Image (spheres, helix red, strand yellow):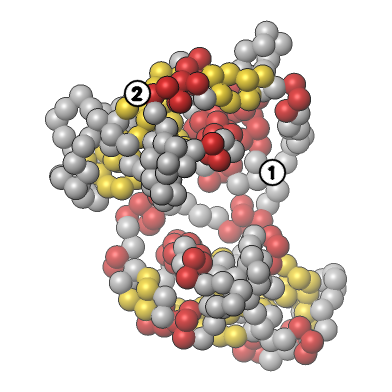
Amino acid sequence: MTLLSKLFKLKNGITKSSVRVYSEKASNDYVKFIRPSKSYRGTFDGFVKKTEVPKDKVFPSETIFVSTDGQGSHSYAYVSAFEFVPNSNVVALIPKHKINLIQKHYYARCISANRYKFSYGRKPKGDRLENISLPSKEEIPQWALNYKYSLNKITERKKGKFLKIETKKWKWFTYDYLFIPQRGKVNNISKNINSEKTFPLISATTKNNGVVGYLDINTNDKFPPNCITIANTGQGSVGFPAFQEKEFYATNNITVLKPKFKCNKYVGLFLCTLMKKERFKYSYGRVINEKRIKEARLKLPIDKKGNPDWQFMDKYVRHLKLSAYV
């Protein structure tokens, strides 16, 4: 690990009061003006004219920028898909060593993961931001380097007719009706785990889709792909669902939900989103056990026969604007 200041130079933006912000782009001399936001799309605040701002405040596309202020927007980091000028509550990060676009996206995610260290009263400015610990270039995991990014796709809206959600017509189904619940079987999670092995090990955590390491063991403890895992316990993870697209192992504090229907990643993610809405029913003192998991219910869209409408769920997720990254 290394400090952010060892990897990047921090460049501050300009105050909004010092420049004229336009609502439309009149020519190519205009660039986007960026403000703090908890969403990438929300960072757009209008346009400024290049000739009206200092040249060193205009940054090229594929530059990392970080929100340094805001009640709910501080510490979010993104990679720009456009040339821009940041306001005074946004910092641009200029790499001290050559890194590619995939590595920039990875570092932006790492920086955003440090949000818990800051607050409205403790802003990520100056030394606080510079002293964030980040993986060195050599420590970036292979799975991150293999991920496919496209800045153009991030800014595109999905074309096609919008699929409306009308929950009044939905129907309740028990987990026992939808799944075969089965407890994870791995007891000692510290044994034989490393990042170079083949099959992910799922445990009670909300991070990294529940993956805490990788295993290769000659047992029948492995679960098939296209299952959903739920954390049975944990201070902040109880009830957390995650869709597992590949074969995996699970610890004994995980319940694996094996679908009784044909499931894919789109349907699985739709179900996980609904399951997260039910997490309020559980806590560290009210863990998920075999009885509670069987009695748990999900309200789902239904077809004309009153069965879960798996086709609708599949289409709905495929329609979402970032579904290309699923």
Mark 2 nearby-residue class (10 Å; few <14, some 14–19, many ≥20): some
Q: Give, as a three-letter code, the residue at label 2.
A: Gln
The residue where tag 1 is placed is 158
Which quadrant of the figure contains the N terminus? bottom left
- Assign a secondary structure to mark 2: strand
Check the image and report above or below for 19 versus 225: below
Which residue does the numbered mark 2 point to in the structure image?
182
Toward the viewer: 158 or 207?
Answer: 207
Q: Nearer the viewer, residue 260 or 141?
A: 260
Q: Quadrant of residue 281?
A: top right
Whether residue 28 is visible to the viewer of this picture, yes or no, is no
x and y, in percent, of residue 29 in the image: 77, 79
Q: Is residue 226 positioned above or below 87 on the image?
A: above
Q: Position of residue 237 (x, y in %)?
A: 43, 45
- For the image, the number of numbered tags is 2
- Dot 1: few (<14), some (14–19), or many (≥20) neighbours within 10 Å? some
Residue 9 lies, in percent from the top left, at: 47, 84
Q: Which mark is residue 188?
A: none
- Disc 1 is placed on an element classified as loop
